[in-house]
Each structure stands twice: as structure tokens, then as C-alpha cells.
Image (spheres, rainbow, N blue to C red):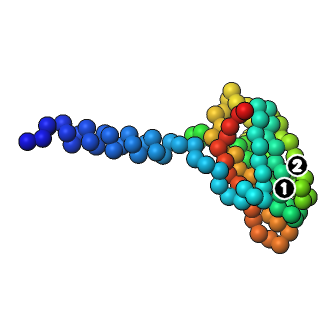
């Protein structure tokens, strides 16, 4: 006869394994060959490698938890153009600037629209190097 707490322990183990698998920061996804994003200690650098002009380019820092996204609007980027965005240039919907001490960043999202109307989007985990 199995131990009386066997089922309980098994349930806890399965729950913890699911939690650990879901908490990973994940890998970069999206159009990585067309929009290149590099992060450093104080800035995020966005490069348009799509070969075409990008319109309505928006960069976001997504915090951990239910907080609002910190957004900065780049607007238009020509082919091959590189923009460096200081972390303080991102602000939330109340115009509060982003700070690593006030919000724990989880991901960075950069999106833009090509001239032909297609939308490009890149999402990657926030890393300070």
C-alpha cells in the first residue's frame, strides 16, 4: 500500500515543476532579422535592418506584475538607421519615467509598420549587460 502522503507530494511536485517552467524569461521572438535590439546598462539600441522604412515605431518596457508598460515613440526609422534610447526616455501612462529601482523590467517589445502595411514586432527578455 502506498504511503498516505504520496499523492499529495506528487501533486506538489507537479505544481512546482509547472511553476518553474512558466517562470522562465523565454527567448527572443518575432522579426529578429528585421529589427535588431541591443540592451546595455543605461540604454536600449534599436536598429532597422528590414531594408525598408519603418513607420510608427514604438518601444516598450514591460514590467513584472500588473504595472503599466513604459513606452517611448520613435516614429519613423529609415533603412539601416540606429537609435539609442535611454531608459529614462520611457514613461508610463501617467508620464512617470522608467527606473530600474521603481519597476522590475521583464521584457522589451519593439514594433513598427513597414511602408507596405505589414507590422513587424520583436519581443525579448530584458537584460542589462
Disc assigned to residue 2: none
Q: Residue furthest front?
A: 33
- Lower sequence index among marks 2 and 1: 1
Position in image of residue 26 (x %, y %): 58, 47
- Dot 2 lies on which element? strand
Q: Secondary structure at mark 1?
A: strand
Is residue 97 among what the camera can see? no
26 vs 99, nearest the viewer: 26
**Distance in Å between CA atoms under marks 2 and 1:** 7 Å
Q: Residue at x 75, y 58 (%)?
A: 33
Image: 23 above or below 32: above
Q: Which mark is residue 48?
A: 1
Residue on which the image places disc 2: 82
User: x and y percent of residue 34 in the render?
Assistant: 78, 59
Q: Residues within 10 Å of mark 1 (few under 14, many from 20)?
A: many
Position above or below: 77 against 52: above
Quarter of the view holding residue 116: bottom right
Q: Is residue 8 visible?
A: yes
Q: Do the numbered discs 2 and 1 sit on residues whose CB atoms are within 8 Å?
A: yes
Place residue 40 in its image quadrant: top right
Amino acid at each position: 500500500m502506498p504511503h498516505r502522503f504520496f499523492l499529495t507530494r506528487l501533486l506538489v511536485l507537479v505544481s512546482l515543476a509547472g511553476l518553474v517552467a512558466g517562470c522562465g524569461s523565454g527567448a527572443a521572438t518575432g522579426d529578429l532579422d528585421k529589427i535588431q535590439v541591443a540592451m546595455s546598462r543605461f540604454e536600449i539600441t534599436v536598429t532597422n535592418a528590414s531594408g525598408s522604412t519603418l513607420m510608427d515605431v514604438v518601444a516598450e518596457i514591460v514590467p513584472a506584475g500588473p504595472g503599466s508598460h513604459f513606452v517611448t515613440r520613435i516614429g519613423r526609422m529609415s533603412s539601416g538607421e540606429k537609435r539609442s534610447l535611454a531608459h529614462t526616455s520611457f514613461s508610463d501612462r501617467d508620464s512617470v519615467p522608467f527606473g530600474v529601482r521603481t519597476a522590475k523590467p521583464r521584457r522589451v517589445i519593439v514594433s513598427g509598420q513597414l511602408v507596405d502595411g505589414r507590422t513587424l514586432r520583436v519581443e525579448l527578455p530584458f537584460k542589462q549587460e
